[in-house]
Image (spheres, rainbow, N blue to C red):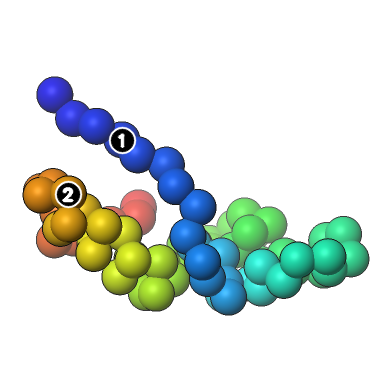
Amino acid sequence: VGLEVHAQVISDAKLFSGASTAFGATPNSQVSLVDAAMPGMLPVINRACIFQAVRTGLALGAEINLESVFD
């Protein structure tokens, strides 16, 4: 049995790309090649978001995966 939690974190970039998350930007101005799912592009994890997620998980006594892989 597992628990999946979704939460919004404070970050200057998206979770799986380096694209900005600036509020109020013009439509489609914050889209990277990763966001657009261009062929051959793999996600790049935002370290700041992972740090926040791991810290939260540890505070809750959760088991933290040591590795995430994208195929």
Residue 24 seen in the figure: yes
Number of marks present in the image shown: 2
**Residue 2 position (above or below residue 24):** above
Residue 58: image location, x then y, percent: 15, 58
Q: Please report the residue visible at 50 percent of the width from the left and 52 percent of the height from the top.
A: 8
**Residue 16 position (above or below residue 11):** above
Residue 32 seen in the figure: no
Q: Please report the residue visible at 47 percent of the width from the left and 60 percent of the height from the top.
A: 9
Q: In the shown orientation, is residue 50 left or right of residue 13?
A: left
Residue furthest top as drawn: 1
Residue 61: image location, x then y, percent: 10, 49
Residue 44: image location, x then y, percent: 45, 69
Residue 24 circle label: none
**Mark positioned earlier in the residue sequence (2 or 1):** 1
Q: Looking at the picture, tell me which residue is in the foreground, 33 or 59.
A: 59
Q: Amino acid at mark 1?
A: Glu
Q: Please report the residue visible at 21 percent of the width from the left and 53 percent of the height from the top.
A: 57
**Is mark 2 in CB contact (under 8 Å) with mark 1?**
no
Q: In the shown orientation, is residue 27 left or right of residue 14?
A: right
Circle 1 crowding by C-alpha within 10 Å: few under 14, some 14–19, many from 20: few
Q: Amino acid at mark 2?
A: Leu
Q: Looking at the picture, tell me which residue is in the foreground, 55 or 4.
A: 55
Residue 56: image location, x then y, percent: 26, 57
Circle 2 crowding by C-alpha within 10 Å: few under 14, some 14–19, many from 20: few
Label 2: state its secondary structure: loop
Q: Where is mark 2, residue-wise?
A: 60
Label 1: state its secondary structure: loop
Q: Quadrant of residue 2?
A: top left
Q: Please report the residue visible at 35 percent of the width from the left and 53 percent of the height from the top.
A: 71
Q: Where is mark 1, residue-wise?
A: 4
**Residue 34 position (above or below residue 19):** above
